[in-house]
Amino acid sequence: MSQDYKSEDEVLGKAYDSKLMKRLLGYVKPYRNYVILAIILNIVVAGLGPLRPYLTKVAIDDYIRLKDYNGLMMIAGFLIASLLFQSVIQYLLTYYTQYMGQKIIYDLRIKLFTHVQKLALKFFDKTPIGRIVTRVTNDVESLNELFSSGIVMVFSDIFIILWILGFMFFMDWQLSLVTLSVLPLLIYGTFLFRRKVRDAYRDVRYHLARLNSYMQEHITGMNVVQIFNKEDAELKRFSSINADYRKANVRSVFYYAVFYPVVEILSSLALALIVWYGGGEIIQNQMTIGVLFAFIQLTEMFWRPIRDLSEKYNIMQTAMASSERIFKLLDNETFIPNPSEPREMDKVRGAIEFRDVWFAYNGEDHVLKNLSFKINPGETVAIVGATGAGKTSIINILSRFYDIQKGEILLDGMDIRELDKRVLRKYISTVLQDVFLFSGTIKSNISLNNPEITDEKIIEAAKRVGAHRFIVELPKKYDEEVKEKGATLSVGQKQLLSFARALAYDPQILILDEATSSVDTETEILIQKAIEKLLVNRTAIVIAHRLSTIQNADKILVMHKGELREMGNHQELLAKRGIYYKLYQLQYKDQEVSASHKEQVSTPK
């Protein structure tokens, strides 16, 4: 766990932050009518509760004491009516607050997901996926509690306390002061509780983020775990992280387990004071039994919202911490900027030019240095070089997944930074070595649910790349379900689908990044035939380690340590006897050794 990761997930802030709350309330604004209705309902519900002890006082003093049976029946009717009315209002209050909360959370999740999709790949290079998932799930769910039962219900608790105090002071202000004499102890205890819970909660959030990150990483890499028999070792690490999370939660629960009994003791103390003082007043005929009985009921009701407010404090603390992290993600501006007035492109010919391009992923650690070359429309250009030479970086900056530090990249004579990113990428399709398939169907993975790509286009694309043959053998053909990451398909089948996907979008520029390195010889031959058809009237950039697959390229760029060292066709580069010649010789020897080994294995002894 990196220190940066730890420091971010320990962000906690104040239990109430006015700036954060102002931003959160911005999401409430479209539903302000629901808020107004909820507050009105809260005032009514809060008043109906304390009304019952007052009616009990009237029943005792005015009817029971005078043996007025008819009056007593009337008060009993009022009590039942108030209970029924309160139940109806409480139902409406709960329904509308929960409904409002779900609407707000829906809006927030949509905004978060939209924002995450716009972030540059540089952000995802440095940010653990588990952390992003935690933001969109756990942290947003914390805000759900705030909007559904936090903000509005805080009003409910406050209104209940105010109504109770109002009834108390209306009936007997002196007994009210006696009852409230224990409040300083409660305030001091609450202060200690808040401080301890705040520290405990910080640990809970930190260990939860660790747990999510570990789970996501190891489930994604489960095949590696199982190949190297690391199940027991990883289980021990997971058990350690899980134990830390459990301990943090237990510590948080401990403070609540202490705080609630303290509140009960203080409420019992207040009740004892009422009995002591009120009983003395009754003996001296200074107070009626009805008032004493009402105060006992009101006191019990008074401490309930006090306990609830402590729980609301926890919700508020959780929400403030979560919102701080959510807004930190929303405020992240790791974007590839779009020009304010992008240039228009009516038709793309596919001419590409790199002019003195310098590029680094981090600081001054340039992976491409002073790179210059031209690709004419319709040309097929191959890029070769050792691992780390900068081949993949070239296609990353051509598609503007990253921006260059110096130089220019031109498409049909226009600087790609002057074009809208979406328009630029519309003309480029990339087939990667590591194919990613989404959960869905074969059809949806080819079209990516683009309504402009018809079923006829999907089938035609699949036929041209040779994928149609295996698709029609599936039980549901093009409607066959694809499991997560294409788990039920072979590597070759997934690669063919990625070719069909690229072709279905009919790009003017086609990029193949080690696109045939993961397939068997038969499938490679099939793909090579498909590629020949794909490249007609298209500009193509092919990155390959196997030089045998690029011998027919119009131009070959030889990269070495981020620099363009050689350029020419296959025969020209061999004649130079430079880097390309050495690479070719190495691969030719490897192929001879491999063929010799196969011959020895197949020869009977």
Image (tube, rainbow, N blue to C red):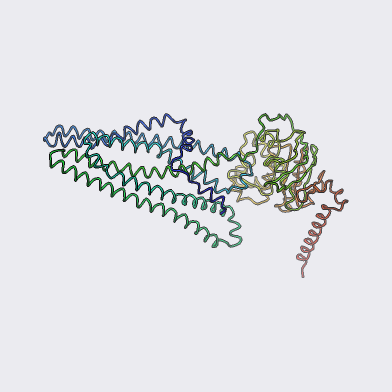
* 261 relative to 73 in the view: left or right: right
* 566 relative to 293 in the view: left or right: right
User: Is residue 515 among the parts visible in the rendering?
Assistant: no
Up-down: is 45 above or below 202? above
Which is more toward the observer, 522 or 18? Answer: 18
The quadrant in which the N terminus is found is: bottom right
Up-down: is 27 above or below 209? above
* 283 relative to 104 in the view: left or right: left
The single residue placed furthest to the bottom in the displayed view is 605
Q: Residue at x 14, y 34 (%)?
A: 63
Residue 505 image point, x, y percent:
68, 37
Which is more toward the observer, 491 or 406? Answer: 406
The quadrant in which the C terminus is found is: bottom right
Classify residue 228 by image quadrant. bottom right
Residue 163 image point, x, y percent:
29, 35
Q: How many marks overall?
A: 0
Classify residue 500 by image quadrant. top right
Residue 81 image point, x, y percent:
25, 33
